[in-house]
Image (tube, rainbow, N blue to C red):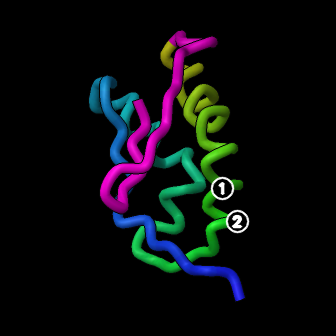
Amino acid sequence: PALAVEIARVDVRGLDEAMTANVVNSLSLTDEVGGDISERRLDYLLEQAPDEAREALEPFGYYDPQVTLRRENGAVVVE
């Protein structure tokens, strides 16, 4: 069986409140917070997250923002 990992939280940094809320609500990663998922599933979600974040920022006029992700103490940080 695949090893399970837990996403403790997803932190979105560097945006105002409305943009942050839109990004958080758009990320598939947030559906998995607090649960155990396989490393393979986490890798897939991390691959999808930058595009999901970019798409969430389009209504605010950002069509090609720089999005970075990293894992930090059980959290996924999106900047």
- Specify the label residue 43 is tagged with: 1
**Which one is nearer the viewer's eye here, 31 or 2?**
2
**Placement of 61 over or under 77, stated as above or below:** above
**Placement of 75 over or under 22, stated as above or below:** below
Q: In this view, does 3 lie to the left or right of 75?
A: right
Residue 73 is a magenta residue: yes
Q: Which amino acid does label 1 sit on?
A: Asp
Q: What residue type is labelled 2?
A: Arg
The residue at 35%/50% (across/down) is 72
The residue at 68%/81% (across/down) is 2
Residue 77 is a magenta residue: yes
Quarter holding residue 26:
top right
Q: From the top left corner, tell me how far across and down residue 74 is, in percent.
A: 36, 62
Extent of the magenta region: 61-79
The residue at 70%/65% (across/down) is 40
Q: From the top left corner, tell me how far across and down residue 6 is, in percent.
A: 45, 72
Is the residue marked by circle 2 packed among few (<14), some (14-19), or many (20+) residues within 10 Å? few
Mark 1 vs mark 2, CA separation in Å: 5 Å
Q: From the top left corner, tell me how far across and down residue 24 is, in percent.
A: 44, 45
Q: From the top left corner, tell me how far across and down residue 11 is, in percent.
A: 34, 45
Quarter holding residue 9:
bottom left
Is the residue marked by circle 1 packed among few (<14), some (14-19), or many (20+) residues within 10 Å? few
- Specify the label residue 40 is tagged with: 2
Q: In this view, does 14 lie to the left or right of 54?
A: left
